[in-house]
Image (cartoon, rainbow, N blue to C red):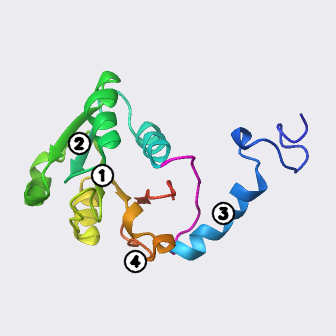
Amino acid sequence: MDVVEGRTSGNLYTRYGLNPTIRSLEAKLPDLEGGEQALAFCSGMAAEAATFLAHTRAGEHIVCLGDVYGGTFELLGDNLPQLGITITFLRADEVARLDEVLTDRTRIVFFETPSNPTLHLFDIAAIAAHARAAGALTVVDNTFATAASGGRSPPSPAASVPAGLRPPQ
């Protein structure tokens, strides 16, 4: 219990977040990706769900740009609305409409780049500037382009939360 309650350092089962391998990954990933800190999850869906739930509440809003992984589409389109979180989906060719769908209740602008499955590339800095002006976080899933996969790194210093393997910063 001393380790669980933080009185003593040590290692425990993964579900307690005190696994030495996971802690090593979280310590090294920011250097690899050009970030400040990292939090590892067992799946991308767990990372996205944790990010969305940590930063939105009932009555708030998320904008999703472009194509996304099917599980992400279900989370955004079916699950989060059941919690009172509204979602606006824009196609990749509708990114110019971003300002018109951002509201004072928008907390997150989310997109994948490259997107799944079309591999569409978004201008992270431009989208982040619009989100920031509206007071929203930019959350980017760059699973297909992490340094670990030989892709670009870091995703962009403009992004609030790069979410491929590691939200939040």
- Residue at the disc numbered 2: 104
Q: Please provide the residue range marked out in magenta.
A: 34-43
Q: How far from the left and from the top, in percent, is residue 65?
A: 21, 53
Residue that appears at 29% across and 65% down: 114
Residue that appears at 73% across and 58% down: 21
Residue that appears at 30% across and 58% down: 112
Q: Distance between the Cα atoms at labels 4 and 3?
A: 19 Å
Look at label 4 and name its amino acid: Arg
- Residue at the disc numbered 3: 25
Q: Distance between the Cα atoms at labels 1 and 4?
A: 19 Å
Q: Quadrant of the N terminus?
A: top right
Q: How far from the left and from the top, in percent, is residue 110?
A: 30, 52
Compared to residue 110, the image places residue 3 above or below, namely above
- The label nearer to you, 1 versus 4, is 4
Query: Principal SS element in the magenta part?
Result: loop
Q: Which of the numbered marks, if any, corresponds to residue 152?
A: 4
Chain-order first, disc 4 or disc 3:
3
Tell me whether the residue at label 4 lies in contact with that at label 2, contact meaning CB atoms closer than 8 angstroms.
no
Look at label 1 and name its amino acid: Phe
Secondary structure state at the residue bearing disc 4: loop
Chain-order first, disc 4 or disc 2:
2
Tell me whether the residue at label 3 lies in contact with that at label 1, contact meaning CB atoms closer than 8 angstroms.
no
